């Protein structure tokens, strides 16, 4: 089984110009701890399953930019129907990472009681997402990273990781600061004006 | 000949397009079903049917970070399921979004199961300070661009709430 931090360290080493949307719990905290990035990451805390939909909105509006969305399995089980919407949109610039640690990472790692019987990658396949991957070992994730993540086309990538075992604090920014810093970065890389535009 | 209901759906679609809206997320309520069919067939819009109304909040909030303006179409009961997503995403991060909602449960709604939600619908919007305009006559459809623009000024969601009579082409 992978350690979340090891998997994220590898992702960060391959991270170039992708926009990142994190979810509640350990994905936000660990990504922040590793990168301290305030511009290329939208720290979407406690959205209760909406990170991939939020990322889909960014991706559909910015077809020239690749977007990495992260969900925890606690969020995912609240709203697995998101997969049907993702499949319908089939955005070539969206990769959805599901961080599966079989617990609610942001709430003292309380067990997800039904996760032992769930196969999230199979769920994605059943929803019609062909590029669905299930990684348990870091070496396998590294070996197939280009195929699963960097190849163009919507993909759903399950990272099965151990529990972190401690509280990991996320970015020390209030919501509007996250919005403005991320939005200014999108303005910079796309050349379009997001703020102070009225229809 | 175009039915009165379809005529209203077409006019609403025209107003959405006039706003520059290019993406519509929807989940059907039978009063807005015809509008959804019109949007689906209209090349001016990317239409995204969502699995539940909260997903529309996530999706439309994400489009804020682009030039693609968006709208979420649903019934009043569906909007009530979005309260957490609105306060969590829209209010925490101060992100605009635009709702187009049928006023289910109001006087004139013959569906008993809608009334229990309708009793509290507007009070709940008032409680969370979500600005809205109720459209009870087709003449008022011109309010759509103003209310949409207000969400951008306010940096939070705004809503157009459509009566049954308007959506049926009767007012």
Image (cartoon, rainbow, N blue to C red):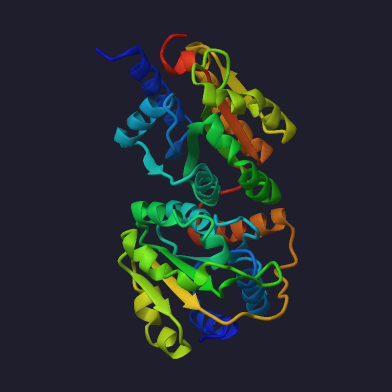
Residue A116 visible here: yes
Q: Nearer the viewer, residue B71 or A182?
A: B71
Going 74% across and 58% down the picture, which residue do you hit? A174
Q: Quadrant of the C terminus of chain A?
A: top right
Residue extending farthest bottom: A139
Question: In the figure, is residue A168 to the left or right of A52?
Answer: right
Q: Position of residue A195 (x, y in %)?
A: 61, 47
How many marks on residues? 0
Q: Position of residue A56 (x, y in %)?
A: 46, 55
Q: Is residue B40 above or below residue A169?
A: above
Question: In the figure, is residue B133 to the left or right of A77?
Answer: right
Q: Is residue A181 above or below residue A145?
A: above
Q: Position of residue A120 (x, y in %)?
A: 43, 68
Q: Is residue B65 above or below residue B140?
A: below
Going 71% across and 75% down the picture, which residue do you hit? A168
Question: In the figure, is residue A41 to the left or right of A169?
Answer: left
Going 48% across and 81% down the picture, which residue do you hit? A14
Where residue A144 sits, quadrant-wise, is: bottom left
Residue extending farthest top: B171
Q: Nearer the viewer, residue B77 or A188?
A: B77
Q: Position of residue B35 (x, y in %)?
A: 39, 27
Residue extending farthest left: B1
Q: Nearer the viewer, residue B72 or A178?
A: B72
Going 55% across and 21% down the picture, which residue do you hit? B143
Residue A21 visible here: no
Question: In the figure, is residue B45 to the left or right of B117?
Answer: left
Q: Nearer the viewer, residue A53 or A80?
A: A80
């Amino acid at each position: 089984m992978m350690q979340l931090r090891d998997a994220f360290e590898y992702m960060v080493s391959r991270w170039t110009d992708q926009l990142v949307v994190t979810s509640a719990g350990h994905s936000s905290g660990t990504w922040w701890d590793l990168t301290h990035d305030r511009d290329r990451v939208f720290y979407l805390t406690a959205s209760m399953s909406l990170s991939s939909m939020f990322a889909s909105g960014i991706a559909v509006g910015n077809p020239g930019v690749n977007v990495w969305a992260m969900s925890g399995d606690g969020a995912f089980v609240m709203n697995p129907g998101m997969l049907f919407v993702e499949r319908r949109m089939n955005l070539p610039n969206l990769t959805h990472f599901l961080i599966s640690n079989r617990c609610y990472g942001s709430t003292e790692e309380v067990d997800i009681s039904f996760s032992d019987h769930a196969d999230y990658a199979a769920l994605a396949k059943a929803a019609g997402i062909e590029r669905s991957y299930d990684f348990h070992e870091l070496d396998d994730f590294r070996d197939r990273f280009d195929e699963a993540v960097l190849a163009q086309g919507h993909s759903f990538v399950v990272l099965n990781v151990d529990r972190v075992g401690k509280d990991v604090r996320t970015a020390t920014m209030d919501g509007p600061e996250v919005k403005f810093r991320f939005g200014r970065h999108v303005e910079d890389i796309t050349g379009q004006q997001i703020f102070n535009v009225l229809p | 000949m175009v039915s009165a209901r379809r005529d209203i759906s077409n006019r609403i679609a025209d107003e959405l397009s006039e706003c520059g809206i290019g993406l519509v997320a929807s989940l059907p309520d039978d009063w807005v079903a015809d509008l959804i069919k019109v949007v689906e067939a209209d090349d001016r819009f990317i239409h995204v049917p969502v699995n539940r109304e909260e997903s529309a909040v996530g999706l439309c909030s994400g489009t804020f970070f682009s030039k693609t303006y968006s709208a979420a179409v649903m019934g009043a009961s569906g909007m009530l399921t979005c309260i957490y997503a609105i306060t969590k995403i829209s209010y925490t991060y101060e992100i605009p979004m635009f709702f187009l909602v049928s006023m289910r449960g109001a006087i004139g709604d013959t569906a008993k199961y809608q009334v229990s939600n309708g009793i509290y619908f507007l009070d709940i919007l008032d409680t969370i300070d979500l600005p809205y305009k109720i459209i009870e006559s087709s003449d008022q459809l011109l309010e759509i661009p103003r209310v949409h623009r207000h969400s951008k000024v306010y940096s939070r969601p705004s809503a157009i709430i459509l009566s049954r009579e308007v959506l049926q082409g009767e007012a």
